[in-house]
Image: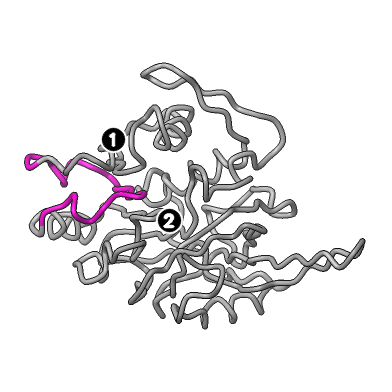
């Protein structure tokens, strides 16, 4: 059982991840962004926790400590990007116990980056989460939280933020920034993951349609969500890995891909410095 916190209601943004979990037959308990964590939530009864645009103010200090303790004891934790994730707009998880649990350092200021010209996600390490996906046709997202991986963590994918210039019938493409996009790690006995982009509009961009074909999943409260098969498989594999739903390894020993190795170097050095002109 996964405890999924955030993304408003299941009829709204939360419907995307909920639809993927439902399609895969993964059981979950959802707490919307506007609702505080119940005082009687049994943290020890969940295999993993997913925080996606869920405000830190939804937890009490005691509950954040309980969450950290559950991860230390073996539960998984994944934080997904958004305005109320990581540092976000107003500081969110900066200064909380989750800073020690997450596989990334949090910024000291607004870490949101909008990408009106797109940000291409590129795999840089082999990992069970990424195996078998269509990386030769990488997805494009529309925004992310700027993060810095901790030394003991592993950056599996980076985002190449594009700069496109139209010079009268001559489009010129360049990389404005290389930033960590998917980082995984360990906190005592628990697995942790940080996904810098969102999995729902608007930051999800074209990633929601990643893969050939289209999956239609009906929601419990009515309505439906459509998404691409590679998008669904990626999120499913992320959930399974972080919750130890299979016997997949923490990571592979020989995991660096040859071609984009330079991207790992750039991503490892990506800082959370002053916001650029394209940042929020």
Residue 55 lies within the magenta run: yes
Q: Answer with the quarter of the image where residue 66 lies.
A: bottom left
In the image, farthest residue toward the right: 169
Give the image location of residue 231, x and y in percent. Answer: 58, 42
Q: Nearer the viewer, residue 25 or 40?
A: 40
What residue is disc 2 on?
81
Circle count: 2
Q: Answer with the quarter of the image where residue 187 lies.
A: bottom left
Q: Which mark is residue 30?
A: 1
Task: Determine whether the residue tagged by mark 1 lies in a helix, strand or loop.
Answer: strand
Instruction: Give me the residue at 32% from left, 43% from top.
Output: 6
Give the image location of residue 233, x and y in percent. Answer: 56, 41
Give the image location of residue 248, x and y in percent. Answer: 46, 52
Q: Nearer the viewer, residue 157 or 75?
A: 157
Instruction: Give me the residue at 67% from left, 59% from top.
Output: 117
> Label 1 vs label 2: CA separation?
17 Å
In the image, farthest residue toward the front: 168
Crowding at dot 2, Cα within 10 Å, few <14 / some 14-19 / many 20+, comes out as many
In this picture, residue 205 sits left or right of residue 168: left
In which quadrant is the N terminus drawn? top left
In this picture, residue 40 sits left or right of residue 17: left
Crowding at dot 1, Cα within 10 Å, few <14 / some 14-19 / many 20+, comes out as some
Instruction: Give me the residue at 38% from left, 69% from top.
Output: 110
Residue 131 lies within the magenta run: no
Q: Is residue 83 above or below residue 227?
A: below
Instruction: Give me the residue at 19% from left, 60% from top.
Output: 68
In this picture, residue 81 sits left or right of residue 9: right
- The magenta stretch is 39-60
Question: Which numbered mark, 1 or 2, is in the foreground of this view?
Answer: 2
Give the image location of residue 134, x and y in percent. Answer: 69, 48
In this picture, residue 47 sits left or right of residue 125: left
């Amino acid at each position: 059982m996964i405890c999924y916190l955030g993304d408003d209601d299941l009829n709204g943004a939360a419907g995307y991840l909920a639809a993927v979990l439902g399609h895969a037959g993964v059981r979950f308990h959802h707490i919307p962004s506007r609702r505080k964590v119940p005082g009687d939530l049994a943290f020890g009864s969940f295999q993993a926790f997913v925080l996606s645009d869920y405000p830190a103010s939804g937890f009490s200090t005691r509950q954040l400590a309980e969450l950290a303790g559950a991860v230390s004891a073996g539960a998984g934790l994944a934080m997904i990007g958004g305005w109320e994730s990581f540092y976000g707009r107003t500081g969110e998880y900066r200064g909380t116990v989750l800073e020690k649990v997450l596989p990334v350092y949090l910024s000291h200021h607004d870490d949101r980056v909008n990408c009106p010209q797109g940000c291409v996600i590129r795999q840089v390490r082999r990992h069970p989460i990424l195996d078998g996906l269509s990386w030769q046709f990488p997805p494009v997202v529309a925004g992310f939280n700027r993060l810095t991986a901790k030394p003991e963590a592993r950056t599996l994918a980076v985002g190449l933020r594009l700069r496109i210039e139209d010079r009268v019938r001559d489009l010129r493409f360049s990389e404005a920034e290389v930033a960590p996009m998917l980082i995984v790690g360990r906190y005592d006995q628990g697995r942790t993951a940080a996904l810098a982009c969102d999995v729902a509009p608007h930051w999800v961009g074209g990633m929601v349609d990643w893969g050939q074909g289209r999956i239609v999943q009906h929601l419990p409260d009515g309505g439906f969500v459509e998404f691409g098969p590679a998008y669904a498989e990626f999120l499913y594999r992320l959930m399974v890995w972080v919750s130890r739903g299979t016997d997949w390894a923490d990571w592979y020993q020989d995991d660096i891909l040859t071609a984009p190795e330079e991207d790992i170097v750039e991503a490892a050095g990506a800082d959370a410095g002053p916001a650029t002109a394209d940042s929020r």
